[in-house]
Amino acid sequence: MFKIEIKAILESLKIAWDSEFRQVEVECDNVLVVETILAGGAVNSRMSELRIIHQLLGRDWRVRLRHISGDHNK
């Protein structure tokens, strides 16, 4: 499930950037995914998707990533 959610976030960020959105809010119900990205674990990750997410977050835009409970994601 972790890899699937990482890939979904990556694709969403790519679409948002390519669509020229410069203020984006990403919600995820997997706290481990959110904490890994926010804590900088993406920088040295063996998962290329996490490294690409880190690169995307470093671009000139505002991205807010936050955890939501699973109840809100239905």
Image: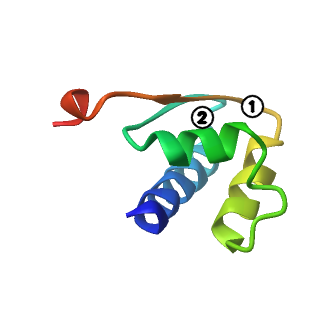
The local secondary structure at tag 2 comes to loop
Disc number placed over residue 61 in the picture, else none: 1
For disc 2, the marked residue is 21
Image position of 22 with respect to 14: above or below? above
Locate the C terminus and report the quarter of the image it occupies.
top left
Among the two numbered marks 2 and 1 on one chain, the one whose residue lies closer to the N terminus: 2
Locate the N terminus and report the quarter of the image it occupies.
bottom left
Location of residue 4 in the rendering, given as x and y in whole percent from the top left corner: 41, 65
Q: As drawn, is 57 to the left or to the right of 74?
A: right
Location of residue 32 in the rendering, given as x and y in whole percent from the top left corner: 52, 46
Residue 38 falls in which quadrant of the image?
Answer: top right
Q: As drawn, is 17 to the left or to the right of 3?
A: right
Disc number placed over residue 29 in the picture, else none: none
Question: Does the CB distance between marks 2 and 1 fall below 8 Å?
Answer: yes
Location of residue 64 in the rendering, given as x and y in whole percent from the top left corner: 60, 26
C-alpha separation, residue under disc 2 versus residue under disc 1: 8 Å
Location of residue 50 in the rendering, given as x and y in whole percent from the top left corner: 68, 61
Picture residue at 48% right of the left edge, 67% below the top: 3
Picture residue at 64% right of the left edge, 47% below the top: 36
Picture residue at 52% right of the left edge, 59% below the top: 6
